[in-house]
Image: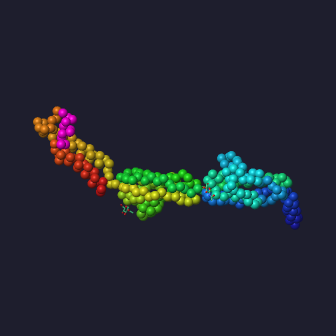
Amino acid sequence: MAFGSQTLSLLLISMLCHSTTFAVILRTTENSVWVNEFESIELTCLIESISTNNPRIEWKKIKNSVPSYVYFQNKISGDLEHRAILREPANLYILNASRSDSAQYRCEVAAFDDQKPFDEILISLAVRVKPVVPRCNVPEAVTVGSTIELHCIENEGFPQSQYQWFHNNDELPEDPKTSIKFYNSSYIMNTETGSLKFRSVKKEDAGEYHCHAKNDAGTSKCSPQTMEVYDLDILGIFLKVLGGVAAFIFVTVGLCQLQKNGYCSCRDHRETNYKVPQHDNRLDYASPDEGHFRHKSSFVI
Ligand SMILES: *[C@@H]1O[C@H](CO)[C@@H](O)[C@H](O)[C@H]1NC(C)=O
Ligand SMILES: *[C@@H]1O[C@H](CO)[C@@H](O)[C@H](O)[C@H]1NC(C)=O
């Protein structure tokens, strides 16, 4: 009983004190807000308690630790001029938000007739920017078994874009092993950087590729680009060409030896090189042609 009345009297005292302590107290509905670029947003600065009739209201923008006035002497100033208004009681309403509005905003209310005459609240604003069309880099032609990397990048989006790749309009899963369709593909995808790396390209990897850059504000995509995959062995081609050249030289030298006394003379090397092709077209062109033919046929397979 004694304890109960003590608590009650304490409560009464605190209530009395509270009502006689004239203080300005601010509150906001959210300390961290976001808006899409070109849309509007209201930063709330609610006055919980005040006794002063005409409090001084100010808003400051703090970007990179540098404060600047947004609302000062009953006027909107700075880069928000003509783009913001003050709404009752002390809210800042920003129209057509721009990416440069991303900052911290501080509402400050000074009420000189109150015993605690000052309060402030800080709100951070993030302006989301839709990604622009990403730059996509897809090689036109690659050979089976080679290691290649496709790139997709854009730098305007905020927050930073995430990337998705599509092969013939099918979205590539981040892990190819999770899909029946792409199970055998050797790619490694990085959704943060937009890189799509194939450790060993396969025939089935050929086709059209495009990419999406995506964030909370929207999505943009690049147009599809075709990648062809050839069954071509560079070393094999090189050896064939080399073999062709060797055969050509061999035949030329052989002809010279055989016809030492004839039309072809090995005394003048320059003359020989010019005259041999004229002399026997069929033989001379056979070797390089064969090399060329092989090159082509393996190209098609
Ligand atoms: C919004 O601002 C942008 C520039 O940031 C301007 O191009 C556009 O016309 C403005 N839109 C409106 C509705 O005022
Ligand atoms: C993946 O490779 C295996 C073995 O070579 C084959 O049986 C299967 O059909 C392939 N899957 C696809 C989707 O190509």
Magenta residue check for 272:
yes
The picture places residue 228, in percent across and down from the top left corner, at 37, 56
Residue at left offset 75%, top offset 58%: 90
Left or right, 300 with reference to 130: left
- Dominant secondary structure, magenta: helix
Task: Tell me if residue 234 comes above or below residue 168 in the rendering.
Answer: above
Seen in the picture, residue 254 relative to 17 is either above or below; the reply is above
Asked whether residue 286 is in view, the answer is yes
Which residue occupies the extreme top position in the image?
267
Residue displayed at 19% across by 36% down = 271
Quarter of the view holding residue 169: bottom left
The answer to whether residue 298 is left or right of residue 45 is left
In magenta, the rendered stretch is 268-278
Residue 39 in the image: x percent, y percent? 63, 59
Ligand 1 position by quadrant: bottom right
Residue at coordinates 76% horizontally, 54% vertically from top-left?
74
- Name the residue located 87 percent from the left edge and 62 percent from the top edge: 12
Q: Name the quadrant of the N terminus.
A: bottom right
- Asked whether residue 106 appears in the rendered view, the answer is no
Left or right: 280 with respect to 158? left
Which of the 4 image quarters holds residue 93?
bottom right
Q: Furthest residue to the left? A: 261
Q: Nearer the viewer, residue 60 or 240?
A: 60
In the image, 146 versus 46, the foreground residue is 46
Q: Nearer the viewer, residue 94 or 227?
A: 94
How is colour applied across the structure in the image?
A: rainbow
Instruction: Give the image location of residue 154, x and y in percent.
Output: 52, 53
Q: Quadrant of the C terminus?
A: bottom left
From the viewer's perspective, tell me whether residue 297 is left or right of residue 201. Answer: left
Inspect the magenta stretch and tell me whether residue 249 lies in it. no
Furthest-bottom residue in this view: 1
